């Protein structure tokens, strides 16, 4: 059968969330061939929940020691989620542009991030939760006919009280080697554009991939990925701080 294995990860360490996702793919070795390019890969479907110190690591733009897209490459990728960068990018000749840029899909022709920001502000003001605070990248009038279409499909935020926000993001398809860069860039943007302006903070991120895969040419890299040691005091300190803050606001 061609049904990909599914996996749910609950992590308080961002680096080990990635390592666990990679190792799941490697352990199951569910082989598929993708599209007209006939790229061979090992596939999975994964939902990754991150809380605690993992949020600090993501917003602090940290990556696993063995992650190959850190440093300058990560910084360059993060810039693609910045409005000023997009303004300059759109001045380039069309032949020098990518097929799509996520930020452009999210704010043009409708500024969905501004709508999310206003939606969250109302949730906070009314102290309610909404499942309608979301943005999408898919353009049904053009994407089904294109060879290169957005991997990111939807992001949403949900107010859960005491200034806390739940973030969800759903991906159609992605290479596991891009996962940490995707999460860091996207969630820093969500925090800057939507969450912080509402006076809130992210306390949980749920990242879902319909297809999270390792291409054959990345197999050796993936085999070397290992979990990193975790200091239990880090999460204990963050938990105590959160409890104290909640007590003050109750």
Image (cartoon, helix red, strand yellow):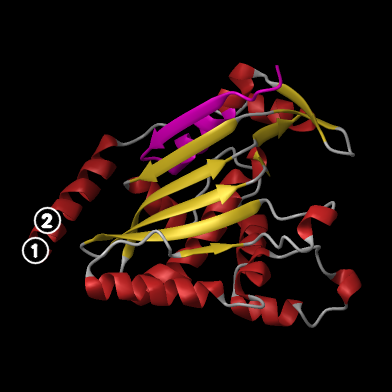
Corner quadrant of residue 14:
top left
Image point (46%, 59%), residue name: 156
Residue 128 lies within the magenta run: no
Residue that extends furthest to the front in the rendered view of this protein: 141
Picture disc at residue 248: 1
Region in magenta:
1-22
Where the N terminus falls, by quadrant? top right
Q: Circle 1 — which element?
A: helix
Where the C terminus falls, by quadrant? bottom left
Residue 13 lies within the magenta run: yes
The residue that disc 2 covers is 244
Q: Are marks 2 and 1 in contact (CB under 8 Å)?
A: yes
The residue closer to the viewer here, 9 or 22, is 9
Q: How far from the left and from the top, in percent, is residue 240?
A: 16, 48
Q: Is residue 186 left or right of residue 132?
A: right
Q: Is residue 237 left or right of residue 10?
A: left
Q: Is residue 205 left or right of residue 179?
A: left
């Amino acid at each position: 059968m061609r049904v990909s294995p599914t996996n749910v990860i609950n992590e308080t360490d961002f680096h080990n969330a990635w390592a666990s996702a990679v190792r799941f793919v490697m352990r199951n070795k569910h082989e598929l061939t993708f599209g007209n390019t006939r790229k061979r890969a090992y596939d999975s479907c994964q939902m990754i929940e991150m809380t605690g110190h993992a949020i600090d690591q993501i917003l602090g733009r940290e990556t696993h020691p063995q992650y190959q897209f850190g440093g300058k490459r990560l910084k360059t990728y993060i810039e693609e989620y910045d409005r000023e960068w997009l303004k300059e990018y759109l001045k380039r000749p069309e032949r020098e542009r990518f097929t799509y840029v996520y930020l452009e899909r999210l704010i043009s022709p409708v500024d969905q991030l501004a709508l999310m920001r206003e939606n969250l502000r109302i949730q906070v003001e009314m102290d309610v939760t909404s499942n309608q605070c979301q943005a999408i990248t898919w353009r049904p009038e053009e994407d089904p006919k294109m060879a290169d279409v957005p991997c990111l499909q939807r992001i949403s935020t949900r107010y859960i009280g005491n200034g806390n926000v739940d973030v969800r993001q759903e991906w159609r398809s992605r290479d596991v080697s891009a996962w940490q860069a995707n999460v860091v860039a996207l969630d820093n943007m969500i925090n800057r554009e939507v969450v912080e302006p509402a006076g809130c903070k992210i306390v949980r991120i749920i990242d879902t991939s319909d297809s999270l895969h390792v291409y054959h040419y990345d197999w050796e890299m993936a085999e070397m990925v290992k979990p990193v040691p975790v200091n239990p005091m880090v999460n204990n300190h963050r938990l105590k701080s959160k409890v104290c803050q909640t007590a003050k606001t109750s």
